[in-house]
Each structure stands twice: as structure tokens, then as C-alpha cells.
Amino acid sequence: MGLNNELFTITLDYFGSYLPNMRKSSPKTITTYRKAMEQFLDYLKEKNEVRLYQVTITMINRKSVTEYLDHVETVRKCSVSTRNHRLDCIRSFMKYAATCNMEAAAMWTEIQAVTHSREEKSPVEYLSVAAVEAIIAQPDSATKIGLRDKFLILFLYQTGARAQELVDIRFCDIQMGKNAVVTIHGKGSKVRKVPLREKLVEHLKKYLKMFHADTTQYSTDYLFYTNHNRTHTRMTEDNVRRLIQRYGDLARKKEPTIPESVHPHLFRHSIAMHLYQNGVPLELVSQWLGHSRLETTFIYAYADTEQKRKAIENAIPEDSTLKEYLNADRYSVEDDETIKRLYGLK
């Protein structure tokens, strides 16, 4: 077996050097891309009836990529979003390969013509302000654990942090002062600074006094931790999930709109929706959440638009002649006029 195939040299450089060193991709991202390319190369091997080392760059063309994506969706029964993600992975690889090899450059030109499939959008799930307040009210702040839990939930909501981002925050990531901020280390090694509101800072000071009384300003101790043998250990995402679910179950007795499943990400969706509904532009909401693409934040515009559509439908009697004008497509963010308004172009 002769491994002198240019494709494998490029693959080795792409995963071993380009992604970690040039793009600064996280280990999780690299693993995801590697798995996607592994499955694609296996597909090419089977389709061309060759050994894996015999798969060449010229086999990665517009036709093979399109057929593979159809295979992902129809044979492997993956979702449209998975199909589109596979295309993103292949595109990223071939864009790099095009800088290393002339044949790859030709194939890259072809592959750019392969488009994403349209995904059926569904409104994002989020909590009302009343539901959020009901959950935050559950921990007994007169106790040490209750004080911690109340602050944790409030922090999760007001910063829009993901569960992993929350438990990864260290004491040195908090900057107090007139304009307090927290540095959040997000997905793909992306870092963002989120301002801390006055009410949250008040809870933060109480929390620090109780849990970080002797911690120095530049300490790398985790902000949220558990004690094991008198040693501070990073709180886990599962700790946070169980905590959130417990208080969600308690709050549901007073606020029946709270869903059966209450999880940390629900608070991220909730603060995003509440900001958007209160007039904060999508661009700022996107920055707040640390989205790399504005399109990701569009789910909140869609959810708000869908909510308004349903409200209008409910307000008009079934036998009203106005019902015929309630075409859901008119309210979809796929509509160009709606999109222009959401972008502030109208």
C-alpha cells in the first residue's frame, strides 16, 4: 500500500496543523470535522469501489458531494441541519485543499455551487419573564446553598451563558468596578465580554463574600464550584442541569406555564427573546450570545413573528372573513420585506 496520495497529505495537514494552529479551532470542533470527513471518505471508497488510500481529490466533486448529501438525508436518515453541516465541513476542507493543490482548486470551484438545503424552522422554546422570575424566586437565599443557587440562575439568565460557559468561568474572569463585566469563553475558543447589570452585581457581591471571601483578584479558582476533600472542584454541567430542573419543578406549582423540562439553555433562549422583544437589534443580541453568524440569531425573530401570528389568529373568530388573510407564509422571516425590516433596512 503506497500512501503517497496527495489527498491524505492535505488531510493530515488540515487536521494536524491548519485547524488547531491557524484557525484556532477547539478540540471539539476538530473532532466534529474529522468525523464528518471520515464518513464522507468512507462513502467515496464504497461508491468508487476502491480502497481508502485510493480515494483521490478528483473524486471530491460537485456530483459526488451532492450525492453524498442526499445519502446522508435519505439513507442515513439524518436531519436537514446535519446535511448542511456535512456540507460546511466538506467546504471548509476543500477550501484549504485548494490552497495546496491545483486539482483541489478545480474541485473547490465546483463544490461552491452546491447549496444548503432549506430547513423547516420551528419556534424556539423560551420562558416568559414571569416564569423566569418564578424559578429565580425558589432558592432560599437565607441559606448558603440557596444564596448560591439564586445567584447562579440569575447569572445564567442575565448573561445568556451556556451551561459549559457558566461552569468554565474563573474568578479572574470577573472585573468589578463602575462597569462590571464577565469574560466568557465560548464555543470554538471564542471570547466575549458581557456587562453585569446592577442587580446582578449586588447578588455577585453577596455570593463572593460567602464563597470567595479569601480569593485574590487574579485567582484561577472557578466561580462556581463544589467541595471535595476541602478542595474546590469545577461544578459540572450535570450539576447545573439538575439544579435548574429541581427549581423549575418547584416553580411550576405557582407558574403553570413552565414546561416539564427546564434546562440551562432555556434561560439563554429566554434572555435573547426578552432582549429582542424589548427592542434590542438582532445584531446586538447576536453579539451578546456570542454567535459567529447573525443568521443563527434569526430564530428569535422567527419565534417572535410566529407568536404574533398566533395571537392574531386567536383574536379573530373562526367564522370571520378575515381568516382567509391569515396566511402563515406572510409572517415568515423568509419573506424579504420582513427580513429587511428586521435588519433595519425599512
Image (cartoon, rainbow, N blue to C red):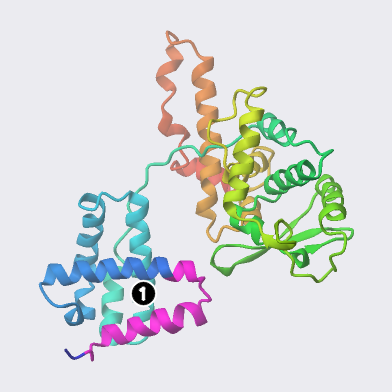
Dot 1 amino acid type: Phe
Placement of 302 over or under 218, stated as above or below: above
Say whether residue 64 is magenta: no
Residue 272 relative to residue 17: left or right = right
- Quarter of the C terminus within the rendering: top right
Q: Is residue 206 visible?
A: yes
Farthest-out residue, front: 229
Q: Main secondary structure of the magenta part?
A: helix
Q: Is residue 329 above or below residue 231?
A: above
- Residue numbers of the magenta segment: 3-30
Q: Which residue is more in the foreground, 304 or 321?
A: 304
Identify the residue at horizontal 27%, vertical 83% (top origin): 7
Q: Is residue 279 above or below residue 23?
A: above
Kindly indicate the quadrant of the structure image that contains residue 11: bottom left
Residue 19 magenta: yes
The N terminus is located in which quarter?
Answer: bottom left
Which residue is drawn at the image coordinates 55% and 28% (left, top)?
A: 308
Q: Is 28 situated left or right of 199 in this image?
A: left
Return the x and y of residue 241 as percentages of the image width and height: 58, 45
194 to the left or right of 19: right
Residue 346 shows up from this direction: no
Query: Along the line of sight, which residue is nearer the eye, 252 or 273?
Result: 252
Q: Secondary structure at mark 1?
A: helix
Question: Residue at (69%, 38%) from the top-left corner?
Answer: 278
Front residue of 312 and 164: 164
Q: Quadrant of residue 127?
A: top right
In this rendering, the answer to whether 197 lies above or below 230 is: above
- Residue underneath mark 1: 93
Q: Position of residue 189 (x, y in %)?
A: 58, 69
Image x and y of residue 113, in percent: 29, 65
Q: Position of residue 46 (x, y in %)?
A: 14, 68
